[in-house]
Structures are given as structure tokens and as C-alpha cells.
Image (spheres, grey):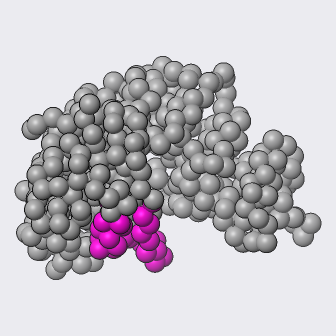
């Protein structure tokens, strides 16, 4: 049985673990890094992320150097441009970034709305499809990008730094807005031309379980790894969780946390203007995804603003109680759940309350937030059903200790069974077997 170093890099932390098959034999404490949020811009300093990676790996001690392979899961998109030596020319721009609305609109107007959806499976959503971020940098910082030798996502950057390889997997490539997602057919020359970039600076696309490269001696010293250890190309974190759930056609996988992600696995992708469509990363399977960009984060925003004196466990008990009471607890107050914008819209929506009166209480406002999220969660089911793949009614669920998922599923239409999946991303990496290119 192979021993694997699993690296799970999310939007705020790195988790390093040692896996034997899908069993976590050891796991280091989370190593956190910060996102820099300035207006609609959301970036991570590459140096901060690399420092967190070193910290997480060091938490495993010598066991990190005794593995057979390194398996990688990353948040996406997390766009970055590099020079010829692999040094970052930009920050890592995350999926929460919304600065590129005007650029997204221009890309779609030039190429055509339906043609863009057909070409890459998605509309050019600001930040969520990273060609829009690239367009923003070409407009606002062209001198920086003139030195770009390689442009990709987070797994591209980590491979360039650790193994020297120039790679990306189909799941990440799907969210560049430049890839033939529906056919897995490589980079799309027309979409590249529409953006005004050369495919020569894009990484090679390989399936996620392929060995992208071997750890260099320099990186081994820097990160506490063993020189020559194989490192797979890697894939998006949600794909790893779906693999653990079985990745059968019709399987639903729901990650219920700060962001709520509901993904449907399919063998016949049907792009939809209100969904994200991407490759699974291995084989000929795809995920169609509906995301609530601010789920638990909206509820805990209410705590910070209106319930700061309440202990966290008491607050959790309170929002669960309100969820069980239903809409009556919010009175006339309604909430639009778009505190972090909307992943599947070019023109960005914002969160907001309506129906407030001088008699409105903070409890009614909390209830309205909970009800708005529950309503939005249920509204996704008809969208996914319209894709044509019959939905399996056993849902794999990954969530936090607050068990928000139980509320979010309250109003789902029909009969459903929910199966809790723990450590979904890390354990999902254990389902992969490293294969040579």
C-alpha cells in the first residue's frame, strides 16, 4: 500500500496529511494564510501561501519525507502569472475576486454569449473564470504581464516551484475560460485570441493523477520533502471530495461551510448560464456546480455585527432554533444571500435586507439570513435537474461542526438521504494512484 503526502490548500489554510489508501494516518495542524481584500479585489500573497505550506509540512516531521508520492488539491480558480524562472509576477487572485466585471462583459460581447458558453462550458464570470482576471491585468498592468512566461492556477504555480513542471489538470483548466471543457480537447485558440494571449504561456494539461514532476533538490530543502518524490498534477478540492463520494453519474456532493457548493457528477455535461461546468479532473466525467458564495460566513457576519457578546455555542444553538421555527421567526424581514456576490453572474449582486421596521429585532434579522440561505439552497435543485442527468437521492455532505447542512437541506423538494463524509478533500486524494505521463 502506497503512503501519500496529501496537501489540501483551501482559501485560507493548508492542511498536510499522511494517507494510506483513504485513511488519514497523520495530519498536521492547519497552517493559515490571509487573503488581502481591497474593495472587489481578493488576493493572496504567494510568499504567505508558501510559508503556510512549509509550516504545514513541517508539522508532519520526518514522515513527510517517507512518502511514495505527493497528492495535491487546491482551491480554484487561483490565478497567477510567473516569469521564466517561476517567480510570481502577480499575487494569487482567488475565486472571490470581483474586480473584473467590465472585462468579463467585454470578453463576452466580443465572442458572443452563446458562443462563449458553447466553447468552454461557462460564461466569463468575474473572478470565477480566470480569463476575466487575466483581462484585467492586461488592461491595468500590461508591463507586468509582458514578462510572463507561464500563467495558470495554483497547482501550476506549486509545480513550477517544487518540481519545475509546467502543468495543470482539466478541472483547473476548465475554470480558466480558455479550455475546451466539454470535450477535454485542450486549449481553445479562439478564446485565447479573444483574450489576446498566446497559448504558449499556458501550462500543459494532464489528468490529475499523472505525475507532473519530481521534487527538486532545492524544493526538498525548502519544504522539508525528499528529493525526487513524485508529485501528481493535482486537482480542485471539490473534485477530490467527489471522488471520495464515488463520482458516479447523478451523485450530488454538498460542501456546506463558509461557502456552500453543490456539485452534480455527470458523464454528459450540458452547460447552463446559471451553473459552473468543469471537468472532474480524471476520466471523462464532469461536475456541474451551483455555489452560494457566502453561506456560513453570512450567518457569522450577523454574529459579529449584532450578537458579539453571545458565546459561539449559544449563537449556533440560536440559529439552529430559528431554522427549525421556519419563516415565521423573521416576521416581515427578508434577506438576499449575496454578501460575497454571485459566482454565476457577470453583474454582481449584493446582499441586503428588506421589510425592516422600527420594531425589527436582531433575532428577526438572523432568522431572515437563515431563511434566505435555506431558500437559495433549495432553488438549486431544479437547475441541476435541468442538466439531464437523473439525480441520485443519496447526497454526500461535508460540513463543519455547526451542522448548518441540516438547515440548508430543510426545504429540498422530495425525499433525500444524506451521508456525512469527513475529511473529504484529504481522503479523496487517497483514491488516486499516481501514474506516469
Q: Is residue 148 left or right of residue 97?
A: left
Q: What residue range appears in magenta?
A: 30-57
Q: Position of residue 204 (x, y in %)?
A: 12, 48
Res. 420 image quadrant: top right
Q: Is residue 97 above or below residue 227?
A: below
The verdict on residue 46 being magenta is: yes
**Front position in the image: 283 or 48:** 48
Q: Position of residue 182 (x, y in %)?
A: 27, 34
**Front position in the image: 239 or 15:** 15
Residue drawn where x is 11% and y is 59% of the image = 216
Q: Position of residue 185 (x, y in %)?
A: 16, 36
| The N terminus lies in quadrant | top left
Residue drawn where x is 64% and y is 59% of the image = 298
Res. 118 image quadrant: top left
Q: Which residue extends farthest right?
A: 359
Q: Is residue 205 left or right of residue 55?
A: left
Q: Position of residue 63 (x, y in %)?
A: 29, 51
Residue drawn where x is 57% and y is 29% of the image = 419
Amino acid at each position: 500500500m502506497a503512503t501519500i503526502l496529501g496537501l489540501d490548500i483551501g482559501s485560507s489554510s493548508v492542511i498536510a496529511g499522511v494517507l494510506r489508501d483513504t485513511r488519514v494516518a497523520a495530519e498536521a495542524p492547519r497552517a493559515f494564510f490571509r487573503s488581502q481584500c481591497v474593495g472587489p479585489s481578493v488576493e493572496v500573497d504567494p510568499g504567505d501561501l508558501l510559508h503556510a505550506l512549509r509550516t504545514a509540512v513541517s508539522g508532519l516531521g520526518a514522515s513527510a519525507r517517507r512518502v511514495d508520492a505527493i497528492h495535491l488539491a487546491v482551491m480554484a480558480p487561483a490565478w497567477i502569472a510567473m516569469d521564466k524562472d517561476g517567480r510570481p509576477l502577480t499575487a494569487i487572485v482567488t475565486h472571490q475576486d470581483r474586480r473584473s466585471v467590465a472585462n468579463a462583459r467585454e470578453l463576452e460581447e466580443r465572442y458572443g454569449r452563446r458562443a462563449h458558453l458553447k466553447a468552454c462550458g461557462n460564461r466569463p464570470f468575474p473572478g470565477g473564470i480566470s480569463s476575466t482576471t487575466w483581462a484585467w491585468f492586461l488592461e491595468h498592468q500590461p508591463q507586468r504581464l509582458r514578462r510572463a512566461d507561464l500563467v495558470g492556477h495554483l497547482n501550476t504555480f506549486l509545480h513550477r516551484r517544487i518540481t519545475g513542471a509546467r502543468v495543470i489538470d482539466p478541472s483547473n483548466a476548465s475554470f480558466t475560460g480558455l479550455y475546451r471543457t466539454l470535450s477535454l480537447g485542450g486549449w481553445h485558440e479562439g478564446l485565447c485570441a479573444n483574450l489576446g494571449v498566446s497559448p504558449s504561456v499556458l501550462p500543459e494539461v494532464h489528468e490529475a493523477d499523472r505525475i507532473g514532476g519530481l521534487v527538486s533538490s532545492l524544493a526538498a530543502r525548502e519544504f522539508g520533502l525528499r528529493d525526487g518524490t513524485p508529485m501528481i498534477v493535482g486537482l480542485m478540492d471539490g473534485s477530490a471530495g467527489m471522488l471520495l463520494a464515488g463520482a458516479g453519474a447523478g451523485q450530488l456532493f454538498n460542501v456546506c461551510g463558509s461557502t456552500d457548493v453543490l456539485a452534480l457528477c455527470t458523464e454528459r455535461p450540458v452547460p447552463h448560464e446559471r451553473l459552473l461546468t468543469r471537468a472532474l479532473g480524471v476520466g471523462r466525467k464532469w461536475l456541474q456546480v451551483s455555489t452560494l458564495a457566502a453561506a456560513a460566513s453570512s450567518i457569522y457576519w450577523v454574529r459579529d455585527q449584532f450578537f458579539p457578546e453571545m458565546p459561539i455555542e449559544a449563537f449556533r444553538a440560536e440559529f439552529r432554533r430559528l431554522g427549525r421555527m421556519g419563516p415565521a421567526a423573521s416576521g416581515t424581514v427578508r434577506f438576499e444571500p449575496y454578501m460575497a456576490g454571485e459566482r454565476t453572474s457577470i453583474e454582481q449582486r449584493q446582499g441586503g435586507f428588506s421589510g425592516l421596521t422600527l420594531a425589527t429585532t436582531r433575532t428577526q434579522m438572523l432568522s431572515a439570513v437563515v431563511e434566505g440561505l435555506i431558500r437559495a439552497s433549495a432553488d438549486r435543485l431544479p437547475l441541476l435537474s435541468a442538466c439531464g442527468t437523473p439525480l441520485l437521492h443519496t447526497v454526500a455532505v461535508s460540513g463543519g461542526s455547526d451542522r448548518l447542512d441540516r438547515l440548508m437541506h430543510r426545504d429540498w423538494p422530495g425525499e433525500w438521504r444524506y451521508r456525512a463524509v469527513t475529511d473529504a478533500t484529504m481522503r479523496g486524494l487517497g483514491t488516486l494512484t499516481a501514474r506516469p505521463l
